[in-house]
Image: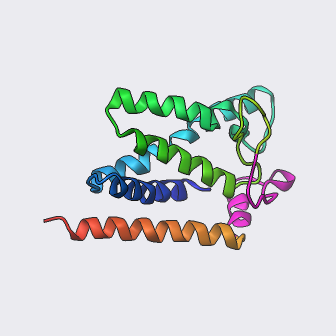
């Protein structure tokens, strides 16, 4: 999934989590959720560095790193929640939503069973990086996939509706 989809999914997930926990949801939570939902992709920098160091070009292998696994985010999420006094359900829920989206909207998936298995799992995998496709050409190929386009648009519309509702309800 793209950065926009991760941020939108974070807003939607935070809304659901906060309402289920009978906690208030406001624009501050929405902003925090949009930010936290992108944290698992910080390993893009590590993947880029590893690829460059090996002299390679092409697809960034960050989904194959242990930093993109449920076990890592379970431990790291608990630590983040404790240090910053954030709701544990919110932090862990946002990380899980990110990982779920990376299993849907990618051609490689993530290592759900790491450290026991290094195999990456993806739902509806598409070979989007064929022949080293990157950048704008990649996104053209990505958005031609009806499932991915529909999922991203749905998340953006839902997140927009939630934020608009919060804006309208500000006294």
Measured from the top left, where is residue 68 in percent x and y?
63, 37
- The residue positioned 82% from the left and 50% from the top of the image is 132
Residue pictured at 69% horizontal, 73% vertical: 146
Q: Residue at x 71, y 37 (%)?
A: 113
Q: Nearer the viewer, residue 80 or 153?
A: 80
The stretch of residues the image draws in magenta is 121-143
Image mark count: 0
122, 23: nearer the viewer? 23
Residue 30 shown in magenta: no
Between 52 and 155, the residue placed more toward the observer is: 155
At 33% from the left and 58% from the top, the residue drawn is 19
Do we see residue 45 in this rendering?
A: no
53 with respect to 11 (left or right): right
Residue 143 in which image quadrant: bottom right
Display coloring: rainbow
Give how far across and how far down residue 73 sits, in percent: 55, 35
**Which residue is situated farthest in the right direction here?**
131
Report the quarter where the N terminus lies: bottom right
Examine the rendered structure and indicate whether residue 148 appears above or below residue 84.
below
Among all residues in the image, which is located at the extreme front?
A: 21
Q: Is residue 54 visible?
A: yes
Q: Position of residue 26 (x, y in %)?
A: 27, 56
Residue 104: x percent and y percent? 68, 57
Q: Quadrant of the C terminus?
A: bottom left
**Quadrant of res 65:** top right
């Amino acid at each position: 999934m793209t950065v926009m989809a991760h941020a939108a999914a974070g807003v939607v997930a935070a809304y659901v989590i906060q309402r289920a926990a009978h906690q208030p949801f406001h624009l501050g939570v929405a902003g925090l959720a949009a930010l936290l939902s992108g944290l698992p992709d910080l390993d893009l920098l590590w993947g880029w560095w590893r690829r460059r160091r090996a002299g390679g070009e092409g697809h960034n292998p960050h989904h194959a790193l242990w930093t993109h696994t449920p076990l890592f985010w379970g431990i790291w999420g608990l630590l983040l929640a404790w240090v910053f006094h954030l709701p544990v359900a919110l932090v862990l829920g946002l990380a899980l939503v990110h990982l779920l989206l990376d299993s849907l909207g990618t051609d490689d998936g993530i290592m759900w069973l790491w450290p026991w298995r290094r195999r990456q799992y993806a739902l509806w995998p598409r070979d989007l990086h064929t022949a080293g496709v990157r950048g704008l050409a990649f996104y053209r190929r990505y958005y031609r996939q009806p499932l991915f386009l529909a999922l991203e648009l749905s998340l953006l519309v839902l997140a927009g509706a939630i934020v608009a509702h919060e804006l309208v309800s500000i006294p």
